[in-house]
């Protein structure tokens, strides 16, 4: 299977897949304007990274920072810092 | 400290000598051509993915052990780093801000004198902020890619000629494995098997 994060092909037994609920699909479709996939696939190493709340949040906010920098967004650093704080706060609370 | 089989000790000795010479010569030539803009306490490059061979891991392990720096907290950092970065994609690693396990609370390298060659060949020649892993611009860092390729090829050949594995792994995993090799828990020619187990473990 192909990892949705790093894009590398991994043996099926080394991957994790997360099936989206209908409400999650609806949210993603509303935000992206495109149909949401049935499931997200993670390779073993990327899955391990997301199990680590600190580094997982760093990865998401870091990717955002890199993407905003690439298009020359003036608020790239501030926006990604805000995103990191939001993700860390969210990950320290129990899932609802 | 416990010695390894003669073939491995010879490979380590040759590697150590070549590493020292290459790094010193490169730094001298680089400084003559470019302004080095690295600043004290700038640790941007300590978040870059550095992969080393078991040979460099052994050199680092011996240095840390000889200086009494292999504390329980450093061991924990090495283990966590090894697990987190095992087979991790380089780009994902860069964005995730995973610090090198040797970076201490004072923002200094615990293994500075024995640091890997890749670290010794890294300098900033522009804005050090461009070395930040999330906004990395390779043009701002010393153009060491060619040199790295040549030294890697040399290291591979040298290690293989002494029957030592040239597979690269994270600093954390390499130092952990080095300790197991030195203690005799794992034979130096069984490194590849140990790494395969990492790949297949959940």
Image (cartoon, grey):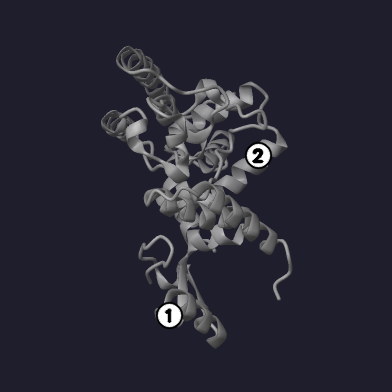
Q: Position of residue A27 (x, y in %)?
A: 53, 80
Say whether residue B96 is left or right of residue B123.
Answer: right
Identify the image quadrant of residue A4: bottom left
Dot 2 falls on a residue whose secondary structure is: helix
Asked if residue B148 can be seen in this view, the reply is no
- Is residue B62 at least partly visible in the picture? yes
Residue with the mark numbered 2 = B75
Where is residue B42 drawn, in percent x and y? 54, 29
Which residue is drawn at the image coordinates 32% and 12% (left, top)? B32
Q: Is residue B55 above or below residue B200?
A: above
Residue with the most extreme front position: A74
Q: Dividing the image into 4 quarters, which one contains the C terminus of chain A?
A: bottom right
Q: Residue furthest bottom?
A: A22
Q: Which residue is mark 1?
A: A37
Q: Identify whether A88 is placed above or below B25.
A: below
Relative vertical location of residue B149 with respect to residue A1 in this rendering, above or below: above
Q: Position of residue B16 (x, y in %)?
A: 42, 21
- Do discs 2 and 1 share a chain? no
x 43%, y 43%: residue: B135
Q: Please tell me which residue is depicted at 64% across the width and 54% down the height of the picture.
A: A85
Mark 1 Cα within 10 Å, few/some/many (few <14, many 20+)?
few
> Camera-side residue: B62 or B106?
B106
**Which chain's residue wears label 1?**
A
Question: Can you tell which mark lies on residue B161?
Answer: none
Assess disc 2: are there few (<14), some (14-19) or many (≥20) residues with their C-alpha within 10 Å of its C-alpha: some
Of A90 and B105, the residue lying toward us: A90
Vertical side of B67 occupied by B155: above or below: below
Foreground mark, 2 or 1?
1
Callouts 2 and 1 close, C-beta under 8 Å:
no
Q: CA distance from mark 2 to mark 1?
A: 41 Å
Q: Quadrant of the N terminus of chain A?
A: bottom left
């Amino acid at each position: 299977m192909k990892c949705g994060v790093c894009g590398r092909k991994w043996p099926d037994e080394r991957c994790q897949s997360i099936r989206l609920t209908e409400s999650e699909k609806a949210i993603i479709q509303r935000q992206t304007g495109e149909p949401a996939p049935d499931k997200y696939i993670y390779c073993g190493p990327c899955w391990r990274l997301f199990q680590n709340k600190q580094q997982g949040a760093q990865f998401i906010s870091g990717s955002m920072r890199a993407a905003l920098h690439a298009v020359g967004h003036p608020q790239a650093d501030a926006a990604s810092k805000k995103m990191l704080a939001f993700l860390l706060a969210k990950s320290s609370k129990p899932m609802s | 400290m416990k010695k390894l089989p003669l073939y491995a000790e010879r490979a380590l000795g040759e590697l150590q000598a070549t590493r020292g010479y290459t790094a010193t010569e490169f730094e001298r030539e680089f400084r003559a051509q470019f302004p080095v803009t690295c600043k004290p306490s700038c640790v941007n490059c300590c978040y870059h993915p550095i992969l080393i061979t078991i040979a460099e891991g052994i050199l680092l392990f011996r240095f840390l052990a000889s200086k009494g720096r292999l504390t329980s907290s450093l061991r924990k950092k090495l283990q966590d780093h090894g697990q987190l970065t095992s087979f991790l994609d380089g780009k994902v690693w860069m964005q995730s801000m995973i610090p090198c396990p040797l970076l201490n609370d004072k923002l200094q390298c615990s293994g500075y004198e024995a640091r890997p060659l890749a670290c010794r060949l890294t300098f900033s020649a522009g804005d050090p902020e461009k070395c930040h892993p999330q906004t990395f611009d390779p043009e701002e860092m010393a153009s060491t890619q060619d040199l790295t390729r040549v030294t890697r090829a040399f290291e591979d050949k040298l290690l293989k000629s002494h029957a030592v594995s040239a597979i690269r792994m994270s600093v954390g995993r390499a130092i952990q494995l080095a300790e197991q090799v030195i203690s005799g828990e794992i034979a130096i020619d069984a490194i590849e098997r140990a790494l395969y187990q990492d790949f297949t473990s959940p």
